[in-house]
């Protein structure tokens, strides 16, 4: 009985057909948009190149801290439990790695003492 079901499923998958549909773009092309009026900000020239108006050092300083504050607000800070967990993992890894370096150093020191007499 189980074999009859399997053969029926096999014939169903053999009958499956895939229809491919090609997309057509029947829309008419749009007319070219009219150019916008020139922007006075875009016409300003800085050091012989077109770009933003030149800022003084105070504006750059303020802009830097505004950008930094914006980025800090986007940070997803960990909660207290996650912070303690990550700190513990860091301390454990540091201890294990320091032990590995210490053992490797002792092994090389003993090998060189053995070779050099």
Image (cartoon, rainbow, N blue to C red):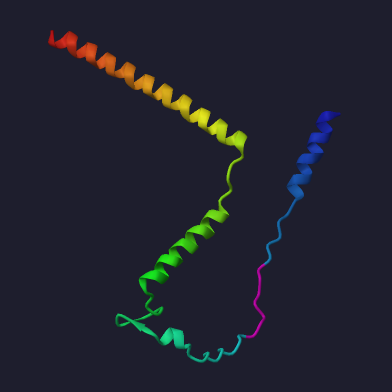
Instruction: Measuring from the top left, give residue 35's x and y in whole percent.
Output: 52, 90
Q: Which is the main secondary structure of the residues drawn in magenta?
A: loop
Residue 95 located left or right of residue 47:
right
Quarter of image, res 22? bottom right
- Does residue 45 lie above or below 117 as drawn? below
Instruction: Measuring from the top left, give residue 14's x and y in whole percent.
Output: 74, 46
- In front here: 21 or 47? 47
- In front here: 81 or 39? 81
- Does residue 51 lie above or below 4 as drawn? below
Q: Is residue 105 magenta?
A: no
Quarter of the image where the N terminus is located: top right
Quarter of image, res 48? bottom left
Q: What residue range appears in magenta?
A: 22-28
Q: Which residue is drawn at 66% across and 82% down?
A: 27
Q: Is residue 26 magenta?
A: yes
Q: Residue at x 28, y 14 (%)?
A: 107
Instruction: Measuring from the top left, give residue 110's x and y in whole percent.
Output: 23, 11
- In front here: 90 or 21? 90
Quarter of the image where the C terminus is located: top left
Instruction: Measuring from the top left, give residue 88's x and y in whole percent.
Output: 52, 28
Residue 57 located left or right of residue 38:
left
Q: Which residue is drawn at 48% across and 62% down?
A: 67
Q: Which residue is drawn at 81% across and 39% down?
A: 8
Residue 48 located left or right of residue 25:
left
């Amino acid at each position: 009985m189980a074999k009859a079901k399997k053969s029926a499923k096999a014939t169903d998958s053999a009958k499956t057909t895939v229809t491919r549909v090609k997309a057509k773009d029947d829309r008419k092309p749009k007319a070219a948009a009219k150019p916008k009026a020139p922007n006075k900000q875009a016409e300003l020239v800085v050091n012989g190149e077109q770009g933003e108006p030149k800022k003084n050092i105070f504006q750059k300083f303020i802009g830097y801290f505004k950008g930094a504050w914006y980025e800090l607000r986007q940070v997803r800070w960990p909660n207290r439990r996650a912070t303690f967990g990550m700190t513990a993992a860091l301390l454990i890894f540091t201890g294990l790695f320091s032990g590995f370096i210490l053992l490797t150093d002792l092994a090389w020191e003993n090998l060189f003492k053995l070779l050099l007499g």
